[in-house]
Image (cartoon, grey):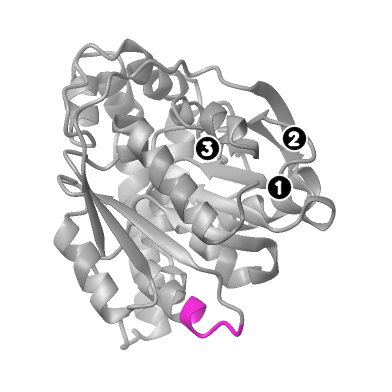
Amino acid sequence: MQQNTFNKEPLIGVPDWGESKYWSYKDLRVHFRVTGEDSDPPIVLIHGFGASSDHWRNNAEIFASEGFRVFGIDLIGFGKSEQNLQSKIKHLENQFWANQLASFLDEIVDIQKNGKVILIGNSLGALTAITTLSNRPELIKTIIAAPLPEPVFVYPIKFSFPNWLLKVKSFLIKIVFHLFPLKTLINLISRTKLITFALQSAYFRSISNDTPLKRIVTVPAKRVNASKALRAMCIGMSNRPNSAKGPSIIEKIQNLPNRPPILLIWGKQDKLIPIFLAKKLIKLHPWLKLTVVNEAGHCLHDELPKHFNQIVMKWLKNLKISK
């Protein structure tokens, strides 16, 4: 395990990096950004909960300048991607997003032409990345998870419930999230100063004056169907089987015949997923590599972008994947 200590950095990036494009997945509109030369090795950036491709404002162009073709995808329900799922999609969860990402790699990134991809994910994006790897390992060269969520249950749950009980649980979860006033809650947070409080939990430094960051999160949250997408996600993530959760996915990856290397990057001051959980995960799975960054929280790619980018580039150079 490697630990780095860095001084605070000013954030100078703007959300609108690269070229903004759209693509269709299951008849749903998907937004993505792209920058860099067509012939360069591909990197795909996958945002975390409540964010979008805009959140890579301080990373994407740097990776492109280092010789990579960089894509940033908005997962369904987030950013500028489709939020009005109607009857097309019942629920949103990491298996759905992994399928979306795999199709994106096949159709837009074009793995057959451009070679295996480097996936870099923040939190929910990292979970989506490893889920994709467990399903389609032939697509992926390496994964950088910054950080990886769901280590709370470091040991996969071995017991199972009878089907009737699972159906009751699923029904109750649906009732709760349909009765819960999600639209009111989203409006309250996104249109008041509560947004600063909510975002601060993901950062070590103060974000009170970071207007672009607040715009990244609040603009999608103010869209008319934001509460529908959030409800679909709450139900989908709550009703997943154990096999679709992080610990089980990591065990599946561990047994892959040609397992790609995975780097975890963790903020030492991460309040959402504390560092002690990362250390437990590494102890259980020593084949994972961990770098700890001091004075950084849950969104360390945005909080300390210069040093995050340096860690990424060093990892890729050591793997001999950089140009």
Kindly identify which numbered label has been placed on residue 23.
Answer: 2
Which residue corresponds to mark 3?
Answer: 77
Dot 2, crowdedness within 10 Å: few (<14), some or many (≥20)? some
Q: Which residue lies at the image location 20% right of the left edge and 27% below the top edge?
A: 8
Residue kind at label 3, given as amino acid type: Gly
Residue stretch rendered in magenta on the structure? 252-257
| Residue 236 in which image quadrant | bottom left
Q: Is residue 31 above or below residue 26?
A: above
Q: Nearer the viewer, residue 149 or 81?
A: 149
Which numbered mark, 3 or 2, is in the foreground of this view?
A: 2
Mark 2 vs mark 1, CA separation in Å: 9 Å
Tag 3 secondary structure: loop
Which numbered mark, 3 or 1, is in the foreground of this view?
A: 1
Which residue corresponds to mark 1?
Answer: 104
Mark 3 vs mark 2, CA separation in Å: 14 Å
Residue kind at label 1, given as amino acid type: Phe
Q: Are marks 2 and 1 in contact (CB under 8 Å)?
A: yes
Q: Could you tell me if residue 93 is visible in this image?
A: no
The percent position of residue 312, horizontal first and vertical second, equals: 45, 47
Residue kind at label 2, given as amino acid type: Trp
Q: Is residue 94 above or below residue 24?
A: below
Give the mark nearest the N terminus, 2 or 1: 2
Q: Is residue 60 above or below residue 167?
A: above
